[in-house]
Amino acid sequence: MTELLVTPKSVEHINVLIEKGADAFVIGEQKFGLRLAGEFDREAMKEAVQLIHENGKKAYAAVNGIFHNYHLNALEDYIQFLHDIKVDRIIFGDPAVVMYVKAQENPIPLNWDAETIVTNYFQCNYWGKRGAKRAVLARELSLEEILNIKAHADVEIEVQVHGMTCMFQSKRMLLGNYYTFQDRQMKIQRNHEDNDKQLLLYDEERENQYPVFEDYNGTHIMSPNDICLIEELEPLLEAGIDSLKIEGVLHTEEYINVCTEQYREAIDLYQEDPEAYEDEKFMLVDPIEAIQPEHRPFDEGFLFKHTVY
């Protein structure tokens, strides 16, 4: 059974997403996890895990940050905390996480998420032999590459099917100020419809607007489009992809709710009757399109096109 994985913004939001059909949730605090849709401190983590488990769902803790030596004591303590509250999986990119998890009496299974470098099945199987139960594939892979990895991987495979992706990350937080000061072609805009919270880089030549997301981990420039694969799920579901993720970072709760509801319907429809999914999939996207931000068109990511580096 394919899992529908979502990114809630709060404990209260988890309740809504359970009703909408989510199977699993990515939660955590930005000190340890990259680009989280919501911030969950330790008290919120305890409450969230309890709520998720009471409803028979899965809680995945994001510990996929970039860690320096001075982070290690706090990281070790956080790994202990995650074992105390019994999250279902720990998402990691740094081997330090693996070492701390292995030191536990009953190690929590790991999901390997190293962003753009998860590009072949040897990598997936390498980390599988070292404790990972799942690999989160790079967003820059084609459908052919995804299916080939799934066919040869010894671990579960997770694919992002909706939402924005990170194009660039810096540990510094001065990018916006730099462009504003230099008065360069890419100017800083504020999205007033989002209460001035969202910062956008505007590329006048291509008319693209790139969200700038700044958190504890630095500056992140996000894609100008949102991936939307609700009409392209058949090959992923047929191949048995284990988890389909909706990325909700920089989107509203309402937006995440609607996406969760529509993808739940799409997955269920395919599993009941693939032909019915083929007939109705074009209508499933309509409620999402109705609330899609005007400056963020949909695309299919790199599913049907080559990555240009």
Image (cartoon, rainbow, N blue to C red):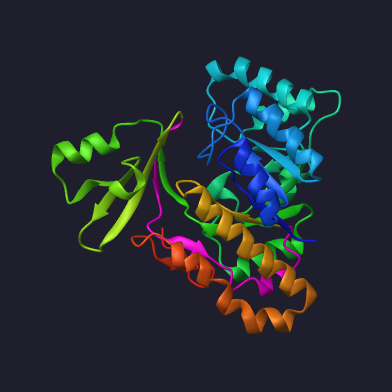
78 or 291, nearer to the observer: 291
Q: Nearer the viewer, residue 294 or 114?
A: 294
Residue in front for this viewpoint, 267 or 242: 267
Q: Position of residue 96 (x, y in %)?
A: 65, 27
295 up-or-down from 112: above or below: below
Q: Residue 157 colored magenta?
A: no
Residue 260 in the image, given as x and y percentages of width and height: 62, 58
Q: Which quadrant does the N terminus fall into?
A: bottom right
Residue 302 in view here: no
Q: Residue furthest right?
A: 105
Left or right of residue 266, residue 57 in this image: right
Residue at image x 81%, y 23%? 104
Q: Quadrant of residue 69?
A: top right
Residue 198 picture location, percent across and down: 35, 44
Q: Is residue 168 above or below residue 274?
A: above
Stretch in magenta = 217-242
Q: Is residue 232 magenta?
A: yes
* Quadrant of the image containing the C terminus: bottom left
Instruction: Tell me if residue 265 can be seen.
Output: yes
Q: Quadrant of residue 53?
A: top right
Name the residue rendered at 59%, 25% in the picture.
41
Vertical order, 283 against 18 (above or below):
below
Which residue: 71% across, 48% down?
24
Give the x, y percent position of residue 9: 55, 40
Task: Tell me if 32 is positioned left or right of 2 in this view.
Answer: left
